Amino acid sequence: MPEDRNKRHWPKWLWNILLIALAIGVVQWWQTRELPAGPAPPLAGRLLDGRWVDLREYRGTPLLVHFWATWCPICRAEQGTISSLAEDVPVLTVATGSGDAAQLSKYLEENRLGFPVLLDESGELARRWKIVGVPASFVIDPRGDIVAAAVGYTTEIGLRLRLWLAKD
């Protein structure tokens, strides 16, 4: 008898799953509708460790550009994902509105974060990239074009899949 009930309810479950997936897709589209697409905007500056970085240096390989802030709880929840990715794929992060270099360095040390960080104290880089909320992640293909963008929490597997798909 329970098997018959499950057989009758699976179409309803499937329909509910599809509606939830559609709702998530619509929200993601709405959040990313103003973000840049096509050629990535310029992004260059001095990393916290003193090295100069320019987005153009990453041509030829997929890259994750990740905007975040120390005050953002979703960004904190995603830190482990970004750290894990940075161990084996090119990642460039931009800390926006997160204080000065000393404050940010202390935050990175306290949280044992080792990914490369470009400081955006004034928010100018975020404005150039049309960021209205963090975290915001961009997958840049080997030609320097944005091929995927996401706002809000993104899973490691989701980011890895997007980076893998960005390969030529």
Image: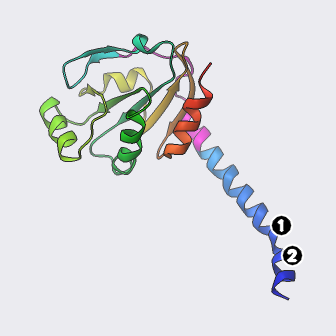
Q: Nearer the viewer, residue 45 or 19?
A: 45
Residue drawn at x 78%, y 61% is 15
Q: Is residue 154 visible to us here?
A: no
Is 10 situated above or below 36? below
Q: Is residue 55 left or right of residue 35?
A: left
Residue at numbered disc 2? 8
- How far apart are the two marked residues, 1 and 2, measured between alpha carbons? 7 Å
Name the image quarter holding the N terminus.
bottom right
The answer to whether 132 is drawn above or below residue 41 in the figure is below
Residue at (70%, 50%) from the top-left corner? 22
Number of numbered labels in the structure image: 2
Residue stretch in magenta: 28-43
Amino acid identity at mark 2: Arg
Q: Quadrant of residue 91?
A: top left
* Numbered badge on residue 11: 1
Closer-to-camera residue (75/33): 75
Q: Estimate the x, y position of residue 122 in percent, counting from the top left.
A: 25, 26
Q: Secondary structure at mark 1?
A: helix
Circle 2 packing at 10 Å, graded few (<14), some (14-19), many (20+), is: few
Label 2: element kind: helix
Q: Residue furthest bottom?
A: 1
* Residue at x 81%, y 74% (from the top left corner): 9
Question: Where's the C terminus, which quadrant?
Answer: top right
Query: Looking at the image, which residue is at 73% across and 63% down?
Result: 16
Q: Quadrant of residue 92?
A: top left
Residue type pointed to by label 1:
Pro
- The circle drawn on residue 57 is none
Residues under numbered marks 1 and 2 in contact, where contact means CB atoms less than 8 Å apart: yes
